[in-house]
Image: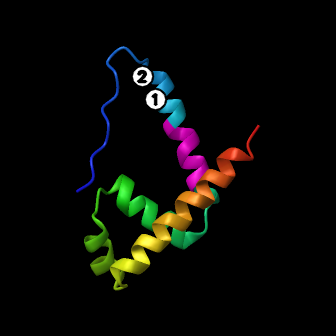
Amino acid sequence: RHQHTSLSSTEPLCTCQEEASDGLEYMHRLKEKSRLVLSLYYLENLTVAEISIALDIPAGTVKSRLYKARQELKTLLDNTP
């Protein structure tokens, strides 16, 4: 499984919630396939192998969809004022 960094205990909770809400808003703008693999990987904490089994697609396809989804998300974020 991949690891997530822990949040600093000094960081205000509302900031985290606002950022999470913003992140989910951008996730909803992604194509369905992109949103699905990102959700399974980052929100459900599934591995590439587990996603491969769940979606009945090769692991390489999962990896390429993750890459493309990250690029798509980055483009959305870069184009936001």
Judge whether residue 21 is colored magenta. yes
Residue in view at x 52 percent, y 73 percent: 33
Q: Is residue 15 left or right of residue 49?
A: right
Q: Residue 4 occupies which quadrant of the picture?
A: top left
Amino acid bearing label 2 = Leu
Look at the image and tell me in which quarter the C terminus lies. Answer: top right
Chief SS of the magenta region:
helix
* Residue at the disc numbered 1: 16
Q: Circle 2 is placed at which residue position? A: 13
Q: Tell me: residue 57, above or below residue 45.
A: below
Q: Position of residue 28 (x, y in %)?
A: 59, 57
**Secondary structure type for disc 2:** helix
Q: Are marks 2 and 1 in contact (CB under 8 Å)?
A: yes
- Image quadrant where one finds the N terminus: bottom left
The residue lying at 55 percent from left, 67 percent from top is: 68
Q: Which residues are magenta?
A: 20-27
CA–CA distance between discs 2 and 1? 5 Å
Q: Position of residue 38 (x, y in %)?
A: 45, 60
